[in-house]
Image (cartoon, rainbow, N blue to C red):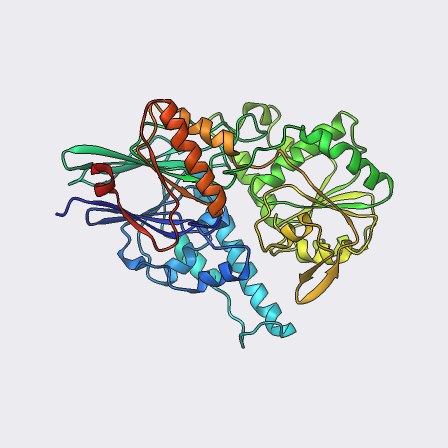
Amino acid sequence: MSESLRLSFHGAAGTVTGSRHLVHAGKTRVLLDAGLFQGLKKLRLRNWESPGFDPSMVHHMLLSHTHIDHVGYLPRLAKLGLDAPVHCTPAAYELAELMLLDSAKIQEEDARHANRRGYSKHHPAKPLYTVEDARRALELRQVLRYNQWLDIEPETKLRARFLNSGHLLGSAFIEMRMELGGREIRLVFSGDIGRHDMPLHLDPRPLPKCDVLIIESTYGTKLHPTTPVIDQIREPFLETLEGGGTILIPAFAVGRSQQMTLVLRRLMKTGQLPEVPIHIDSPMAIKATRIYSRFLDPRNIDPDVYEDGRMKLFPDNVSLHRTADESKELNNLSGPRILISSSGMLSGGRVLHHLRRLAPDPRNMVVLVGYQAEGTRGRALADGRDTVKVHGRHVKLRCRSLQIHGLSGHADRQGLLDWVATAPEPPKLAFMVHGSPDRAEALGTALEQQAQRAQHSMRSFVPEIGDEFDISELLAS
């Protein structure tokens, strides 16, 4: 058998989304993540192109976590021939079902809506994949617990394990080890690295010693503001609520919705915000909270969250809207009130109907609480645009908008540097992914300089989609 180790990049290279990285270990192929491209139309169109590899030739897939830009392409791969086990943590196993069935449903609904309104260039418009495709993909899941080694290929002693990355319930970075040319090679894929001292999620585990690091660079040039979230929220929330307005919070159903409810609960309980109705209009967020409640233990969640059980995740005065009819009832309710709905980048889902209704009224406010990818409606609001297109129609943005910093689930530039510094020594090779080229290059340079200060040599790379690297040669050179 040919002893070689190669890496090829098929997504999240030169851009933030579409996580797909292929490890060629001898004759064994291991896929790291299967994410959707999101944001700009030219990126979204890539979801329809060939993945750049034959899915039927993949032997194993390792899933870092269940955000759509890491898992959302899985049904498409299954449709194209993927039949390999998809390994994930117990919580990710449950969340994957929620995320993929919802993603497939939204795509089917968007295609039907486009056909009714006639705003698609394709006739008829078709979904990227269906609910049936998603169910087929979900049958490939296999549970791998944190710190449990998975033996993949005995001849090269190829094995892998998950370690908690602190980004999301069930999220992990992935460590792989194999024997190559008489020595052990260690590779780590960061997935998305979380932040320290954040509500709900644990701190990321230290980076083990590794030769090769594939690391996200989403905030490769950015530092998170240090102003507490409560101080950012208090005054603008009070002004809007006292003026009879409605606060619309587009929030990711998994993770961010739960964080926001914790923050709001604490503000209302301490009297810093008035007791106004809070509406969670997201069946997915409601289901995700139930999953969170099943993992209230020190391996997954901060202990201060579960002192009084699952109810701490939602404030006392919350209303849950599961059905479409329950969602439509909100159209008849005036402010003051707070409405949380997904998706977090205003890229789809029920929140778009609320945006169309609320955005033209200056009494209301839209609050962005997470990263807004280029090309999304959320990014348009953050950039101060005065109109966005929703369901084929232009919507005027007369409402106030507020972008909250401090709830991001991603480590910033310093957080990433600090995480890499937790390893016993720097890696020899580092590949910057999940970031724009400028941020990726800046983080790579900073990591090289950090390694030099520790009297080690590191080479950093910023791959583009389709690039392949012979790790065996790079480590030997």
> Compared with residue 198, is residue 256 higher up or lower down, i.e. above or below?
below
Residue drawn 53% across and 34% down?
A: 412
Percent x, y of residue 237:
78, 37
- Whether residue 173 sits left or right of residue 107 in the image: it is left
Q: Which of 133 and 38 is in front in this view?
A: 38
Residue 99: in sight, yes or no?
Answer: yes
5 vs 275, nearest the viewer = 5
Of the 4 image quadrants, the one containing the C terminus is top left
Q: State the image quarter where residue 120 is shown.
A: bottom right
State the residue at coordinates (35%, 55%).
Answer: 466
- Residue drawn 55% across the image and 36% down it: 222
For this orientation, the residue located farthest to the right is 243
Q: In this view, does 231 lie to the left or right of 201?
A: right
Farthest-out residue, bottom: 123
Taking 45 as reference, is 333 above or below it? above
How far across and how far down the image is residue 181, in percent? 14, 37
Residue 50 is situated, as x and y percent measured from the top left of the image, at: 37, 63
Q: How many marks?
A: 0
Is residue 318 toward the left or the right of residue 48 in the image?
right
Tell which of 237 and 312 is nearer to you: 237
Using the rendered view, name the quadrant where residue 25 is placed: top left
Quick check: can you spot residue 171? no
Residue 305 in the image: state x and y as whole percent: 59, 27
- Above or below residue 193? Residue 393 is below
